[in-house]
Amino acid sequence: MSSKVVQGARFLSLRILLTERCNLACVFCHNEGQEGLTGLSPLKVRDLRTLLDAAGGRGLRQIKFSGGEPTLFPGLPDLVRLCVEAGYDTAVISNGVDRRALESVAAAGGRICVNVPSADQAAYARLTGGVLERVRVTLDALRGVGAEVAINSYARLVPDVKHIESMLSFANEYRVPVKFLLPCQVSAIEKQNRAHLSYGEALTGFGYTRSADTPYDSTWNGEHGRRVRVVKPWCPSACHEVASHYRSIRLTTRLQLRPCFGNGRFGETLDFGSVEACGRGIDRALSSFAEACGDRAGVRVRRRHLAGVAERESHVR
């Protein structure tokens, strides 16, 4: 893969996994592809500066801190503050349980995305093992300090209109946008596409109108500034469409650089022994992603190959 393809990436999102630990036990959790681990990232503020220096010249625009539950990582606000002061769009993806930690994130200038799988207390408890009221307390506190907050909720391949309505109501209660995340499964491409269309139909029925449509999401606007995003399935087609201008790389707690969730079809997992080595490996990671997803010239061939893989998998499953 030529360096021209790597340098041509206009937007790089770096997702930093700070821990595999969590204070909930969500039944749907994939732990960002790191199941069964319990460690903390060795990342320190000085290490992050090194990584930003290395990635900044590669189109880095966005940094997301996740896990596990990132609020369990000591020093999270300091990491957020460094990224914000350096001018990056900085977000923390959290379950919203630790109000004080997220208030500190907000004070450092970071955006906060709160995962809420259900707005029903009983369903929330069943899905997460937690108490929804704790999340409500956090959202009230964050609204009180003027934090930039959004709600993430996992979408379903067979949309439940009642679930959509309840999540819209929940988000509107706190005057924050909501994002529905469709599951990313190579073997369910057609179901994913149909689900995205069904979510659009449901949102239209609730008075929302589509304001933007990209290869990876659609945005819907409602009354009084209400906003909804529906994130389309990335595997495999959208990865091809966005590879030339948008790439997401993950830094794991074991100092690995991974594309996607470490899916080998979309690039290799690269192991490093230090943050400095990770910085030196950014180009290699981007090249691996571009090769796997296909640049503009190779999109069709790779897409046909993956479609064939998906068809075979669908018969197995």
Image (cartoon, rainbow, N blue to C red):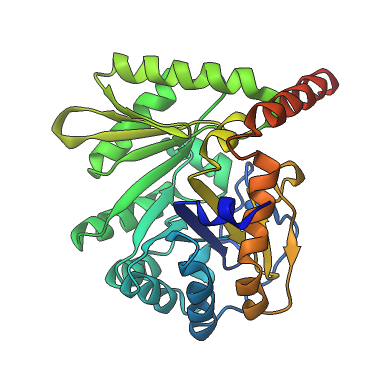
Q: Nearer the viewer, residue 139 or 155?
A: 155
Q: Residue at x 33, y 33 (%)?
A: 228
Q: Is residue 38 left or right of residue 50?
A: right
Q: Position of residue 90 (x, y in %)?
A: 38, 62
Q: Is residue 12 left or right of residue 67?
A: left
Q: Is residue 70 left or right of residue 40?
A: left
Task: Using the image, determine if residue 252 lies above or below residue 74.
Answer: above
Q: Residue at x 41, y 32 (%)?
A: 214
Q: How many numbered tags mark residues here?
A: 0
Residue 262 visible (yes or no): yes
Task: Using the image, determine if residue 11 lies above or below residue 87.
Answer: above
Q: Nearer the viewer, residue 267 or 188?
A: 267
Task: Using the image, determine if residue 117 lies above or below residue 62.
Answer: above
Q: Position of residue 280 (x, y in %)?
A: 64, 73
Q: Residue furthest right?
A: 316
Q: Is residue 155 left or right of residue 270?
A: left
User: Which quarter of the figure has residue 116?
Assistant: top left
Task: Using the image, determine if residue 130 lies above or below residue 317.
Answer: below
Q: Residue furthest bottom?
A: 46
Q: Residue at x 61, y 40 (%)?
A: 295
Q: Position of residue 9 (x, y in %)?
A: 50, 51
Residue 236 visible (yes or no): no
Quarter of the image that includes the C terminus: top right
User: Which quarter of the figure has residue 299?
Assistant: top right
Q: Nearer the viewer, residue 279 or 183?
A: 279
Q: Position of residue 154 (x, y in %)?
A: 51, 36
User: Which quarter of the figure has residue 176?
Assistant: top left
Q: Nearer the viewer, residue 236 or 166?
A: 236
